Image: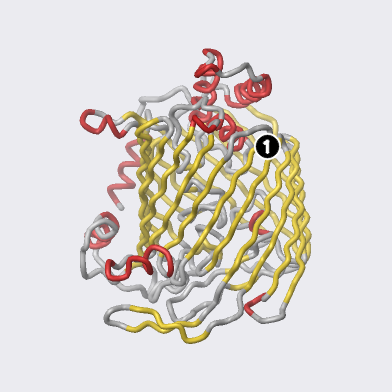
């Protein structure tokens, strides 16, 4: 860890700069939907979807590449005035003029939410390990999400995001939030809280950041590994700003993006201040194929099993791939994902994610589907004129659960990955047209009771409990970045796994924002 801090300090002193800004584009920005449109049209060659958020410089590069292909008429593309207007708008927002010595930008948002949704705790222990998390599907899908509470009652919040750029080498972000609500926050969110507080520095294509900052890994709308469901992580992060071409014998693997982080999960963990270590490697061997490999390791904290630094690193980098024995001091996860574009089908994209919470060769089906893994299968259809995305999510009985780290993969009782949680399945449809969107969802949650028998390890069903079923529809309307209105309704049967218990829940959310005057 000391070497990591030393490397960050070295980056700060480097004088090799890039003219593009190192600041990050918030995950709630509509530019990400715009980039999906450009990809569907086949206008983007080099992009890593599985690691977000993007920097302003990376968005500028993507927009420039798309414009160049459109002007050259790639693959006989017909002239599309809507895409041209989109590129014009993105160029104005993300142009990269010579950076001044210091530049300030800010944004003020007013958020108002009213709902009768009742958050539901995930069953703490079904005999297969613990997890301390709460789900609230309506509230957790209201933009901008990221761990913000939307509870039974009404919530009003003011957020001010301040960004200070020192030339093109460093960016400082301070994003604060004031919240007033008729109900207390299940995640412990206070009246005044920090959404983001970070410093980010760039040297050539290498970026380092320290502080509370967002991080999303995955192809789907709600990734299995790291999503926008929980608040931003308090972390040290090191990675690449944009994909870089691998040299020498690795050149056939195409372009790559790398990242590594170490985070503190806070005092509300079962072992207070458990650390989360993670890394990801993404490759694009061709312009239509992306492959990602990632690993997470939950380790340490007050009262947790002890391990030396060498053992921790060996566990993080070797155990996910090799049969290394004798590591019982942490909870590690291995992630695999792939995305394939199909130009012959008008730019259709298919993608897949898998998160392995454990793996045992003696029970392959159990490890890959029934018990230990989470799986996501998705398809994005070409825009004609509607943009349609279909996804299926499945999580095993032991997914997100652990015998020692009983909080599971959470921050302040909110899952850092897929909000579906363990032992559940969900089907989703996302339909978008211009600034309007509809999300349809149907989900099944299970809370059956088991006992573990070994050797060999197997899981015996003790009690089959009623299923909880949720059917949900949400509508979103946007006016650029100035106004977002969302309304949703959900029908729940078997609520809290009680037969005959039903609820009808609804939510209405409005987010209005204005930019604060920019100073250069």
How far from the left and from the top, in percent, is residue 287?
42, 30
Question: Residue at horizontal 50%, vertical 19%?
Answer: 75
Could you say where residue 366 lies in the image, as x and y percent from the top left?
38, 69
Q: Nearer the viewer, residue 165 or 458?
A: 458
Residue occupying the point 69% across, 62% down: 471
The vertical placement of 363 against 259, above or below, is below
Q: How many marks?
A: 1
Q: Quadrant of residue 209?
A: top left
In the displayed orientation, state which residue is furthest to the front.
344
Query: Could you classify mark 1 by the number of other residues whose Cα lies within 10 Å: few (under 14), some (14-19), or many (20 or more)?
Result: some
Whole-percent x and y of residue 487?
77, 53
Q: Position of residue 82 (x, y in %)?
A: 68, 23
- The answer to whether residue 272 is seen in the rendering is no
Is there any visible trace of residue 448 in the rendered image? yes
Q: Is residue 371 left or right of residue 448?
A: left
Of 433 and 335, nearer the camera is: 433
Q: Is residue 480 left or right of residue 468?
A: right
Instruction: Tell me the residue that label 1 is attached to.
Output: 386
Q: Looking at the image, which residue is at 51% across and 39% down? A: 349
Q: Secondary structure at mark 1?
A: loop
Please say which color scheme the image uses. secondary structure
Asked whether, in this view, residue 308 is left or right of residue 370, the answer is left
Quadrant position of residue 446: bottom right
Query: Residue most toward the bottom?
Result: 462
**Quarter in which the C terminus is drawn:** top right
Q: Is residue 102 left or right of residue 242?
A: right
């Amino acid at each position: 860890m000391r070497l990591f801090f030393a490397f960050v300090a070295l980056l700060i002193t480097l004088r090799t700069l890039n003219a593009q800004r190192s600041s990050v584009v918030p995950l709630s920005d509509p530019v990400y939907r715009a980039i999906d449109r450009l990809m569907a049209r086949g206008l983007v060659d080099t992009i890593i979807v599985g690691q977000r958020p993007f920097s302003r410089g990376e968005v500028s590069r993507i927009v420039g590449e798309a414009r160049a292909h459109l002007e050259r008429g790639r693959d006989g593309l017909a002239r599309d005035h809507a895409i041209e207007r989109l590129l014009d708008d993105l160029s104005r927002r993300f142009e990269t003029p010579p950076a001044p010595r210091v530049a300030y930008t800010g944004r003020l948002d007013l958020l108002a939410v009213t709902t009768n949704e009742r958050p539901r705790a995930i069953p703490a222990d079904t005999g297969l390990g613990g997890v301390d998390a709460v789900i609230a599907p309506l509230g957790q899908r209201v933009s901008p999400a990221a761990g913000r509470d939307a509870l039974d009652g009404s919530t009003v919040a003011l957020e001010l995001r301040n960004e200070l750029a020192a030339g093109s080498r460093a960016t400082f972000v301070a994003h604060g939030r004031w919240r007033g609500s008729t109900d207390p926050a299940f995640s412990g969110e206070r009246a005044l809280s920090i959404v983001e507080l970070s410093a980010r520095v760039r040297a050539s294509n290498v970026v380092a950041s320290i502080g509370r900052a967002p991080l999303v890994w995955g192809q789907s709308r709600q990734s299995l590994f790291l999503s926008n469901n929980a608040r931003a992580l308090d972390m040290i992060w090191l990675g690449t700003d944009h994909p870089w071409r691998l040299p020498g014998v690795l050149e056939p693997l195409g372009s790559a993006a790398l990242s590594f982080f170490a985070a503190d999960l806070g005092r509300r963990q079962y072992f207070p201040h458990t650390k989360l270590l993670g890394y990801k490697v993404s490759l694009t061997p061709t312009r239509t194929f992306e492959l990602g490999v990632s690993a997470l390791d939950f380790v340490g904290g007050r009262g947790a099993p002890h391990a030396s630094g060498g053992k921790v690193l060996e566990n993080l980098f070797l155990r996910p791939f090799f049969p290394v024995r004798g590591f019982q001091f942490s909870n590690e996860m291995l992630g695999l994902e792939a995305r394939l574009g199909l130009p012959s089908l008008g730019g259709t994209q298919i993608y897949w994610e898998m998160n392995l919470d454990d793996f045992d060769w003696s029970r392959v089906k159990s490890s890959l589907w029934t018990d230990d893994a989470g799986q996501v299968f998705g398809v994005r259809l070409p825009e004609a004129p509607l943009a349609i995305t279909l996804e299926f999510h499945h999580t095993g009985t032991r997914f997100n659960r652990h015998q020692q780290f009983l909080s599971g993969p959470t921050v302040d009782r909110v899952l850092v990955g897929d909000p579906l949680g363990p032992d559940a399945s969900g089907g989703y449809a996302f339909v978008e047209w211009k600034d309007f969107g509809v999300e349809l969802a149907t989900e099944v949650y299970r809370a059956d009771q088991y006992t573990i028998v070994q050797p060999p390890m197997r899981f015996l069903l003790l009690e089959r409990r009623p299923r909880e079923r949720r059917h949900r529809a949400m509508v979103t309307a946007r006016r650029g970045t100035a106004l977002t209105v969302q309304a949703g309704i959900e029908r729940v049967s078997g609520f809290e796994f009680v037969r005959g218990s039903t609820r009808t829940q609804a939510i209405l959310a409005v987010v209005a924002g204005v930019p604060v005057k920019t100073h250069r």
